[in-house]
Amino acid sequence: MEKSVFLVILACLLWATPSFGAAAASPDDADSAWVANAVRLVHAAVTGTAPIADFRRQVVDSRKRLRRIFLANMGKGSGTRRALHMQMLVLNSLLQAAASCHQGGTVSCPPTLISQLINERDIVQRLAGKAETPDRGAGL
């Protein structure tokens, strides 16, 4: 009886685990997905159209995903990937600052923060392109 209860509990735990049976995403995929989401968040902050509650929730989710990326890549990766991750951290910090700026229930950032968000977004996108194609130009 105890063995069958144990097996049922184990099966439930494995079923509830999100990554069970699924292949782990590659570092490039995780980085690309985070960057794409961050670009959407920057756009929402710059345009000032996003409801603040939703924006804050998405920024928190973004921070959690970035933490998982950092934990998965600790001590791994090229210099370009490490530089990308550091810039992703800076962009995430700016997004957190944007999450504290609101007026009338929507995101409303000061011009200096908007400028910083745009510049950092551009840096992250440029580094993400380099990190995904480290052998660009090889063989020429």
Image: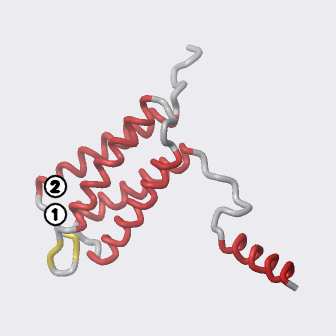
- Residue 4 in the image: above or below residue 137: below
How many numbered circles are shown?
A: 2
Q: Which residue is mark 2?
A: 113
Residue 95 x, y percent position in the rendering: 27, 59
Compared with 130, 26 (above or below) is below
Q: Residue at x 43, y 61 (%)?
A: 64
Q: Quadrant of residue 85?
A: top left
In the orientation shown, which residue stands out farthest toward the left? 111
Extreme-top residue of the structure:
140
Name the amino acid, label 1. Answer: Cys
The residue at the far bottom in this view is 1
Above or below 85: residue 59? below
For residue 46, side relative to residue 111 (left or right):
right
- Distance of label 2 from label 1 (alpha carbons): 6 Å
Q: Position of residue 17 (x, y in %)?
A: 65, 69
Q: Are marks 2 and 1 in contact (CB under 8 Å)?
A: yes
Q: Amino acid at mark 2?
A: Leu
Label 1 sits on a secondary structure element that is loop
Quickly name the residue at label 1.
109
Q: Which mark is residue 119?
A: none
Disc 2 crowd rating (10 Å Cα; few below 14, some 14-19, many 20+) is some
Quadrant for residue 45, please give it: bottom left
The crowding category of the residue bearing disc 1, from other C-alpha atoms within 10 Å (few below 14, some 14 to 19, many at least 20), is: many
In the drawing, does residue 121 fall left or right of residue 4?
left
Colour scheme of the picture: secondary structure
Q: Secondary structure at mark 2?
A: helix
Residue in the picture at 31% in, 54% down = 92
Where's residue 78, x and y in %? 48, 30
**Residue 108 in which image quadrant:** bottom left
